[in-house]
Image (cartoon, helix red, strand yellow):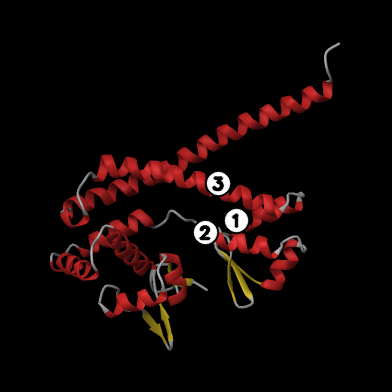
Amino acid sequence: MNTKDDEGGGRIRYRREELAELAGVKVRNLRYYQERGLLPPPRREGRIAWYSDHHVARLRLITDLLGRGYTVNGIAELLDAWQRGGGIAQLLGLEAAMTGDWLQEEPVTLRLAELAALFGGSATPEDTRRARELGYLRIDGDSATYPNGRLLEATLALVRQGVPLEEILDAGAFVQHQAAAIADRFVNLFRGHVIGELGLDQLSSAEVERITEAVKALRPFAGDVVAAEFARAMARRVQEELRALLGAQEGPPE
């Protein structure tokens, strides 16, 4: 279970398995990156190794570079070059600015028995499998963690109103698909008009700083645009539904 880092300005701390899952890498790859010097060592408290959001940013940077065709040796040389040039902090700062703070999530961890009691037996093994597949639920032994407590509350509210959990998960999968398309559109706009065609190894320190500031300035607007358009769409649909209900109650004209 992740915790707040009292000495790290409130940064989240992760165990090795949590870090690997969050960054989308295998634990053995995480160890390999550490052995090759690509990933800074964790902070240790006794026998427990704690990783921070800086490690998440570094792993995502490594994954991005691998996806662009860099080898592990090439990544090591790139990071070393930036380090010697004094710009590695800016490079990782750009990665953190691009990937961090998008998620404002408060995880909730419960015993499996407590979670089952909340849903009153309405959750089937297939529902649990799909919830894990969609990233809504993590199970570790006899504990279950919802990365986003508000999503858990919303799900429970709908279940208590009689909406089948299977259909809620269907809606969740649909929303994820649409959200991915919206995210792609925003990223492509930013990539095409702010970053341009330069690769990370071609960006100067000044350009990295410019892009980092642009990310920080534009980030709030992306969420605001989506939230505003969703609110407008919901208002229209609710009005249409109310008109339809009122029309049904009035009956056909004589």
Residue with the mark numbered 3: 175
Q: Earlier in the sequence, mark 2 or mark 3?
A: 2
Q: Judge whether 102 appears above or below 32 on screen.
A: above
What is the number of the mark on residue 150?
1
Residue 135 visible? The answer is yes
Are discs 1 and 2 less than 8 Å apart at CB? Answer: yes
**Mark 2 → mark 3, Cα distance in angstroms:** 17 Å
Q: Position of residue 210 (x, y in %)?
A: 23, 48
What is the number of the mark on residue 105?
2
Residue 92 quadrant: bottom left
SS at mark 1 in the image: helix
Q: Earlier in the sequence, mark 3 or mark 1?
A: 1
Q: Position of residue 230 (x, y in %)?
A: 54, 37
Residue 15 visible? The answer is no
Residue 200 quadrant: bottom left
**Mark 3 → mark 1, Cα distance in angstroms:** 16 Å
Q: Residue at x 41, y 75 (%)?
A: 27
Are discs 2 and 3 less than 8 Å apart at CB? Answer: no
Spot the residue most to the top: 254
Q: Position of residue 43 (x, y in %)?
A: 36, 80
| Within-10-Å neighbours for mark 3: few <14, some 14–19, many 20+ | few
SS at mark 3 in the image: helix
